[in-house]
């Protein structure tokens, strides 16, 4: 595969376009890691919030989180490049971890932590703020969430030990959340 890519001198962008549009390949385990376009995913699902499932998440999640016990460590397992669950838990847990299978998604999360991401989360944040009952709170949500984030971890639900913990991170979570994640 890599040799073929080199011989064709194909760019990452072109490769993803071919995978998705031209070849009609199923995004199985062999292709998923190169064909998943992080920017396109964020744009398609988190700029307009037209997807009913996403709208439902942002409508009900603040209420669900408010009913859970406070404190402890939370992990968004299969977070993709998204911060929205972390944001919902920012006041209710002590530590937040994001875990995802794909390096391009983990990189986007690290960029967000370092304030280097170009993605505008304001539509999502305003929606969460509306359902938390504090319209202006969206302005401080990202900073409040960043202050609780302790790491971005690799995960693979097909492995026995599904999360790779760095040596400085104690194992185990009090809250493990999985949203829209299917194995690849
Ligand atoms: C549709 S995205 C969901 C992202 C995010 N949870 C959200 O709500 O938008 C599915 C995620 O599952 C992750 N994934 C795929 N295979 C996985 C595996 N074997 N173990 C853990 N996560 C996996 C992908 O990297 C991707 O980020």
Image (cartoon, helix red, strand yellow):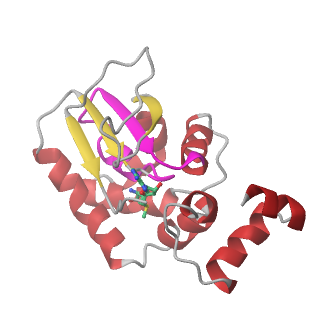
Q: Residue at x 12, y 42 (%)?
A: 68
Q: Taking 154 as reference, is 93 left or right?
A: left
Can residue 104 be seen here? The reply is yes
Q: Nearer the viewer, residue 48 or 33?
A: 33
Residue 117 pos. (x, y %): 64, 47
Image region (quadrant) for ligand 1: bottom left
Q: Quadrant of residue 161?
A: top left
Q: Residue at x 58, y 64 (%)?
A: 31
Can residue 133 be seen here? The reply is no
Q: Quadrant of residue 35?
A: bottom right
Position of 46 relative to 104 (above/below): below
Query: In which quadrant is the C terminus drawn?
Result: bottom left
Residue 42 pos. (x, y %): 54, 63
* Magenta-colored stretch includes residue 93: yes
Residue 122 pos. (x, y %): 51, 58
Magenta stretch bounds: 80-103
Query: In which quadrant is the N terminus drawn?
Result: bottom right
Position of 170 relative to 59 (above/below): above
Q: Taking 113 as reference, is 62 left or right?
A: left
* Magenta-colored stretch includes residue 63: no
């Amino acid at each position: 595969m890599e040799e073929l890519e080199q011989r064709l001198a194909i760019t990452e962008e072109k490769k993803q376009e071919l995978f998705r549009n031209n070849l009609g390949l199923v995004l199985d385990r062999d292709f998923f890691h190169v064909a998943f376009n992080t920017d396109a995913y964020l744009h398609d699902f988190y700029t307009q919030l037209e997807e009913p499932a996403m709208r439902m998440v942002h409508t009900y999640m603040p209420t669900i989180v408010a009913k859970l016990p406070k404190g402890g460590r939370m992990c968004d397992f299969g977070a993709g490049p998204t911060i929205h669950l972390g944001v919902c838990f920012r006041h209710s847990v002590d530590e937040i971890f994001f875990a995802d299978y794909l390096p391009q998604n983990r990189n986007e999360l690290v960029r967000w932590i370092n304030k280097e991401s170009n993605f505008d989360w304001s539509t999502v944040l305003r929606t969460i703020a509306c359902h938390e009952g504090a319209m202006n709170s969206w302005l401080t949500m990202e900073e409040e969430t960043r202050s609780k984030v302790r790491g971005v971890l690799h995960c693979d639900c097909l492995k026995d030990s599904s999360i790779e913990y760095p040596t400085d991170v104690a194992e185990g979570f009090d809250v493990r959340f999985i949203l829209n994640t299917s194995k690849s």
